[in-house]
């Protein structure tokens, strides 16, 4: 007797059992900080961003964006040196003032009372840990992952698939909260129910936004009931 395992598994995914958050642009408003730091660093080395550098790097892992700055933009340092330099500057900026998005801490705490949470971020591990510790959110997340820790950064689905696996859940039983085009594409490709929180300065592309089952413009709209209605 042959069973269609895919159909049987799909039949059992009838509700959202966990929520996976992005970090930059969802919990902390850092996309402009990243751009400012990386543009300044590139300029110090006599180079300029390519026309699509900023949008390309949103969602890239540390290894990917540092190679872009070294190989494509032409910063005369190795990718490893670029990463170390830029991450050091970002950590210093976070120490000076952590740019938490209004309502983000309350939203994380509210959902953590009802769902296991994971974090799937393109930030480096050192920055993830620093942000969560400073914001007092370390204990809110059962799983935290950096795209440094998987094979490919966003828009590839790797980090979301890994987060669901570590939660012990089918990806379709998880919701993802994302702001960027590449993040939305990554979550959609992994099969999660996608919640979009569009960034005002860096809005997602129309095709990426179309992947969202829910679009909220304020994290206060992301209620427990709203998450439960995603499936």
Image (cartoon, rainbow, N blue to C red):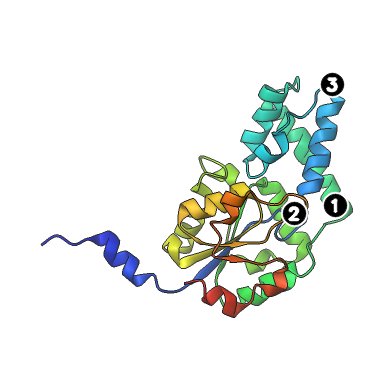
Seen at 53% across and 50% down, the residue is 186
Mark 3 lies on residue: 46
- Disc 2 is placed on an element classified as helix
Which numbered tag is attached to residue 95?
1
Q: Give left or right: position of 54 versus 10.
A: right
Seen at 50% across and 54% down, the residue is 188
How far apart are the alpha carbons under marks 1 and 2? Answer: 9 Å
- Nearer to the camera, 137 or 194: 194
- Nearer to the camera, 139 or 35: 35
Q: Is residue 201 above or below residue 48?
A: below
Looking at this rendering, what residue extends furthest in the left direction?
Answer: 1
- Nearer to the camera, 110 or 124: 110
Mark 2 lies on residue: 130
Disc 1 residue crowd, few under 14, some 14–19, many 20+, Cα 10 Å: few
- Disc 1 is placed on an element classified as helix
Q: Is residue 121 above or below residue 112?
A: above
């Amino acid at each position: 007797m042959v069973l269609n395992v895919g159909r049987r598994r799909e039949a059992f995914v009838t509700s959202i059992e966990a929520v996976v958050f992005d970090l930059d642009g969802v919990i902390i408003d850092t996309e402009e900080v990243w751009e400012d730091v990386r543009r300044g660093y590139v300029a110090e080395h006599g180079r300029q961003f390519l026309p699509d550098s900023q949008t390309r790097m949103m969602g890239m892992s540390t290894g990917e964006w540092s190679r872009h700055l070294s190989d494509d933009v032409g910063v005369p340092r190795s990718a490893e040196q670029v990463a170390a330099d830029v991450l050091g500057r970002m950590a210093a900026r976070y120490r000076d003032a952590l740019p938490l998005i209004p309502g983000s801490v309350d939203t994380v705490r509210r959902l953590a009372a009802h769902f296991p949470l994971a974090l799937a971020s393109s930030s480096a591990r050192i920055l993830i840990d620093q942000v969560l510790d400073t914001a007092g959110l370390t204990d809110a997340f059962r799983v935290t992952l950096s795209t440094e820790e998987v094979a490919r950064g966003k828009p590839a689905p790797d980090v979301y698939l890994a987060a669901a696996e570590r939660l012990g859940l089918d990806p379709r039983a998880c919701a993802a909260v994302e702001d960027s085009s590449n993040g939305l594409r990554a979550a959609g490709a992994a099969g999660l129910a996608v919640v979009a929180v569009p960034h005002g300065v860096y809005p997602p592309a129309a095709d990426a936004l179309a992947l969202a089952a829910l679009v909220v413009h304020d994290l206060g709209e992301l209620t427990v009931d709203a998450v439960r209605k995603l499936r």
